Amino acid sequence: MTHLQNNLQDVHIHLEKGPYTAEWIEQFVREAVSKGIQEIWLLEHCYLFPEFVPMYDDLRRCSGFIDKWLRRKAGRRNLTEFLRLTEEIRGRTYPVKIRFGLEICYLEGKENFLFRQTESLGLDFLVGSIHFAGAFAFDHVPELWQGQDVDSIYRQYFRHAFSLADSGLFDGMAHPDSIGLFGHTPSYPLTGFYDILAGKLAARHMYAEQNSGVYRRCPETAHFGMQPELLSAMKKHGVPLLTASDAHCPEDVGDGIRKLAETL
């Protein structure tokens, strides 16, 4: 996959705040058209579907915060309805190209489970993401960082990132430096970690997202898109870079996409 500035893409758009209907999809399409976006990739977080919830059992036992969060959020949507919607939309014609996929929360040791759950879904793409460093929910609320060993958390994060790339389960990696969401940085340089991650993604022919969602969520502390050193490593290794808004509502579709495209 390649990114062309004259073919603007938004490859990370969530549907979770609305019903699984063509009318809901058409709201995203209209927003994309209004912003000159030619291609949109629609997805859901895997934890929204009951089929994926057992994957989190170990984390829930280790973290009361994660357990409470999943009790509020997990298993609320119907995977069969989501897949039925993808087939309905594929049978229609729209002014933008539409792909459907899942954002898979990568957890080490759950590779076989994920393969079994996703191998026959018939989706266009699976993008892997990391939201936990060990049992630490690093991108949920900033208060959780109080008293944490930042250096250790970063090492865990990149260990997970390397395993995600090595797993062979995914077409791409979502927001690859979301670990910096709340502005925490380690005491050591990350250049070597960036280089290893980019090399592993390239070896698996995976894309990486140049994503505006982290910045939109925390503009005071987050970088717009990847850190320059990470972006440079991705380009050096020839990793395909795709622009993404991480929209969770129609009005955020295409947010920052033109500016992100300029960095590529």
Image: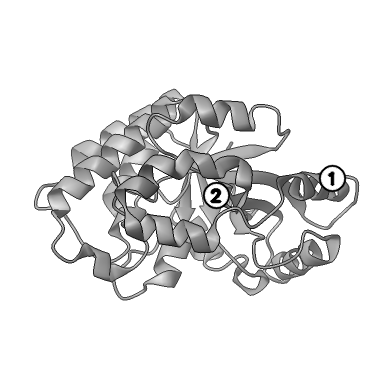
Residue denoted by label 2: 47
**Which amino acid lies under the numbered mark 2 shown in the image of this protein?**
Tyr
Q: Position of residue 2 (x, y in %)?
A: 57, 39
Q: Where is residue 216 in the image (x, y as percent from the top left)?
A: 45, 71
Residue denoted by label 1: 90
Quadrant of residue 102 within the rendered picture: top right
Residue occupying the point 37% across, 72% down:
218
Judge left or right: residue 15 versus residue 27: left
Closer to us: 209 or 157: 157
Residue occupying the point 51% across, 56% down:
261
Residue occupying the point 77% across, 55% down:
96
Closer to us: 13 or 121: 121
Q: Position of residue 163 (x, y in %)?
A: 36, 30
Residue occupying the point 44% across, 35% down:
239
**Which amino acid lies under the numbered mark 1 shown in the image of this protein?**
Arg
Q: Where is residue 179 in the image (x, y as percent from the top left)?
A: 31, 54
